[in-house]
Image (spheres, rainbow, N blue to C red):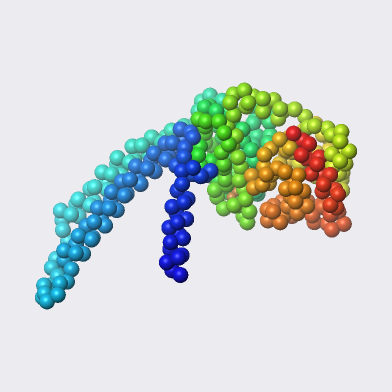
Amino acid sequence: MKKIISLSIVFLLIVSCGKDLPMSTFDTYGPIAEEQAFIFSIIFWAGMVVLVAVEAAIIYVYFKYRRRKNSNRKAAQFHGNTKLEILWTILPVVFLAIVSVPALSAIWNFATMPENPAVVVNVKGHQYWFEFQYPDLHVVTANELHIPVGKQVLINLDSNNVLHSFWIPKIAGKTDIIPNQTNQMWIQADHTGLYYGQCAEFCGESHALMRFRVIVDTDEDFAAWIDHQKTEAYVPNDPLEKEGYTIFMSPKAGCGGCHMIHGSKKAKGRIGPNLTHVGSRQHLAAGIMENTQDNLRQWIKDPGKIKPGNIMASQGAVYMDPNKALTDSEVIALASYLQSLK
Ligand code: CUA
């Protein structure tokens, strides 16, 4: 049994180091992640040299000085060895001095914010999702961060609740999100594509479900995305979508108290994610499931089941008051309306 447990731990450790996994820090796509991986690798390989040398010395001593049959040899008794002690004090000092050069230069590099970032994003950590505001571009979205390829992006991190941490393993190491303190970081992605992000600081029972995506666009795609995000929300024509719209805006459901739908007078809330273009997002509930009709219905029906401890489940009137609970047909209409918000 013990063998099986230790083998599975070794297996898990090995597979978690795979290069082509979505959250591998070894598979870097930006200058910051690259520099961090480089520092890791020099420390790792120097550590391996020490490991092999020490283990080899232990094995050598073990065989050379082992007790032999019919031998009365006594172990040598001595105290200390000045030469060795000086050596193993100086060697680590020299090594640390060498490592401190790239490490300090990297710390300096990460802490020096770009003077002319291409984009500024204010990231707000919520329990349990990420809000992305583009203050200069007048766009607010959630859980899917779009950035242009090859450009420096300045990130301001803030939280109005608990600690979170912003982490896109392939693009940049994590920076904590701390209430009442704006931390900054900058990121840059060198290839277009989809990257995975994750909250990396325990923030409550659904911490592991607080994920996000980074979509690295070409300049044209980014500009088109921004232009589209700025537009007012689609106003439905289809009967089912219209029904969902009416329920969404009704005082009974009260969705608009927490959610913003740009262009609507009744949905001006800022507690939950901005839903103006929620139908254009690829995922729901902070990157934990695909944005499909079926998933959206399940989410609206019982968000607390999918993401325990979230505010919608604990404070939304339709979930707290059995008299206001949504019927199945209302859920279907709501999902249909929300997905029309491309
Ligand atoms: Cu937010 Cu963990």
Q: Which quadrant would residue 148 be assigned to in this image? A: top right
Q: Residue at x 71, y 27 (%)?
A: 228
Q: Can residue 244 be seen? A: yes
Give the quadrant of the C terminus: top right
Q: Residue at x 60, y 34 (%)?
A: 215
Residue toward you, 194 or 118: 194
- Depicted 64 relative to depicted 280: above or below: below
Q: Can residue 261 be seen? A: no
Q: Residue at x 46, y 40 (%)?
A: 27
Q: Position of residue 143 (x, y in %)?
A: 64, 40
Residue toward you, 128 or 55: 55
Q: Position of residue 25 (x, y in %)?
A: 47, 43
Q: Which quadrant would residue 59 be assigned to in this image? A: bottom left
- Depicted 329 relative to depicted 135: above or below: below
Q: Position of residue 34 (x, y in %)?
A: 44, 36
Q: Residue at x 80, y 56 (%)?
A: 320
Q: Position of residue 239 (x, y in %)?
A: 89, 38
Residue toward you, 334 or 84: 334
- Depicted 127 relative to depicted 32: above or below: below
